[in-house]
Amino acid sequence: MADLYDRLLNDLQTLIVGLNLQGVAGIVGNVGSNVYVQTRGEKQRLLDNYPCILVTNEGQTEEESEYGTSYETDGISYPVAILIYDQPTTNPTLAAPTYRQWRITIRTTLRGLVKYPIFADCPETIAIKIHNLASLPDGIPARDNVVSSLVADCWCNEATVRNDTPNE
């Protein structure tokens, strides 16, 4: 079975591809299936397929929380950066509304995921919180081509092994 973080990244990739993000003829192309996953430490080359979206845990750190924690499970946040890329444009003012709409569509879709299981391949996910990406982490490819970004904090329950039997 794949690592929880890997399954989460792949589920987010599938979800974003399914949004079928469309551009504006003559201004911005369509994202289509140009949604890529980059795991921490992996080098991703976007192959000049613009516009595209990168789903990555690069530069993100898991953290434990009381949210979702119980006797049997630990609540852990798995942050995922979602980066929208495009090639440099001669008129960024015309392209900006499209990038903004894609970001809003992704954010709204993720916020609307409340029915369990949120993701088929990662049923441990119990909630998603969206916030802005403060700065691009090191290890992000083609940094100059990032036109918009956000972070999805995916809260997951992980089974906990507890030993409450005193040592004899």
Image: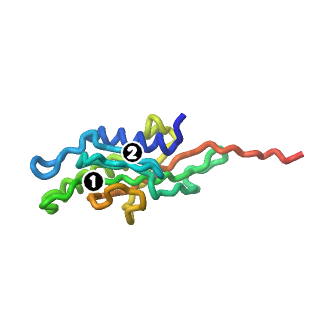
The foreground one among 139 and 136 is 139
Colour pattern: rainbow
Q: Amino acid at mark 1?
A: Tyr
Q: Residue at x 35, y 57 (%)?
A: 150
Instruction: Name the residue: 27% across, 58% down.
Output: 145
Dot 1 or dot 2, earlier in sequence:
2
Disc sitting over residue 44 in the figure? none
**Secondary structure of residue under mark 1:** strand
Image quadrant in which the C terminus is located? top right
Up/down of 59 relative to 164, above or below:
below
Residue 85, disc: 1
Q: Position of residue 48 (x, y in %)?
A: 25, 48
Q: CA distance from mark 1 to mark 2?
A: 13 Å
Residue 98 placement, left or right of 159:
left
Residue sitting at 76 percent across and 45 percent down? 163
- Within 10 Å of disc 1 (Cα), the crowding (few <14, some 14-19, many 20+) is many
The single residue placed furthest to the left in the displayed view is 26
In this view, the residue farthest toward the bottom is: 134
The numbered mark at residue 37 is 2
Q: Amino acid at mark 2?
A: Val
Secondary-structure class at tag 2: strand
Picture quadrant where residue 157 is located: top right
Where is the N terminus found, in terms of image quarters? top right
Q: Position of residue 61 (x, y in %)?
A: 51, 57
How crowded is the residue under tag 2: few (<14 C-alpha within 10 Å), some, or many (20+)? Answer: some
- Res. 34 image quadrant: top left
Which x, y percent locates residue 55?
38, 48
* Lateral position of residue 61 relative to residue 160, left or right: left
